[in-house]
Amino acid sequence: MPRVSEAHLAARREQIIEAATRCFVRNGFHQTSMQDVIREAGLSVGAFYRYFSSKAELIRAIAEEKVGGIVATVDHLLEQDPPPPLAVAFAELLTQVDANLAEQDGAVRIAVQVWGEAAHDPAFAELIGGIYGRIRTSAAALAERARSAGQLPPHTDPEAVGAVVIGLVQGYIIQRVLVGRVDRDTFLAGLDALIGHHPAARSPAP
């Protein structure tokens, strides 16, 4: 029998990932069975299980693939010389989140479901830790460059800034997905009012 090409295998795997993403966004993680995903993908059971054996594997694949957009945005910001102001960088991150949410199968909506699972499932906790660890490391590197460029006080801890950036992005996602009463401009205006013009943000504490 002829060998199946790598391109065919990759295309079939992507077909399953996209089908699973649509199912999870439409019906939720717990309400979606493997049979639902198999039907959505239009595959036989045998063909499906050649690629994935569980929903956890599917979630991992979706997260690792779809989060690439946010990672790519941070990497692009890191390549700019001089680095953009952090306010501009953060606005670009939120733009990426909005673009993902606008897609019918945008995987950012699944993130909230996975966060809930991570609270009591070590496998999901490890998944989330790895993914957001990558983004946090990149955000810390961006903060380091901003500090070197004089955009942040010399005493700034880049790791702390990276942690806060991740928290703000997660907070924005939660509000957009669960509440839907905030937009990027409103969120950025609130952040600027809270931090941007506060004296403590402009000079180190004595």
Image (cartoon, helix red, strand yellow):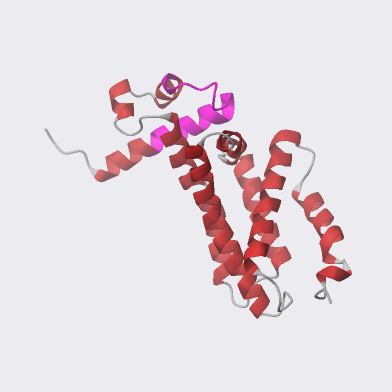
Q: Quadrant of the C terminus?
A: bottom right
Q: Main secondary structure of the magenta part?
A: helix
Q: Position of residue 202 (x, y in %)?
A: 82, 73
Left or right: residue 93 versus residue 10 is right
Within the image, what quadrant is residue 30 found in?
top right
Q: Is residue 96 visible?
A: yes
Which residue sits at x=44%, y=30%? Answer: 55
Residue 44 appears in the picture as rendered:
no
Where is residue 40? Give x, y as percent: 44, 24
Please state the horizontal and vertical placement of residue 48, each as a whole percent of the image. 33, 27
Q: Is residue 184 left or right of residue 158?
A: right
As drawn, 61 above or below 85: above
Question: How far from the left and from the top, in percent, is residue 24?
Answer: 54, 29
Find out whether residue 23 is within the magenta segment: yes
Q: Is residue 32 left or right of residue 112?
A: left
Q: Decide which of 15, 29 is in the foreground and name it.
A: 29
The magenta segment is 14-35
Instruction: Identify the residue at image location x=36%, y=37%.
Output: 13
Which residue is at the front of the view, 160 or 46? 160
The tally of labels here is 0
Relative to 3, is 206 above or below? below
Q: Residue at x 57, y 39 (%)?
A: 106
The picture quadrant where one finds residue 61 is top left
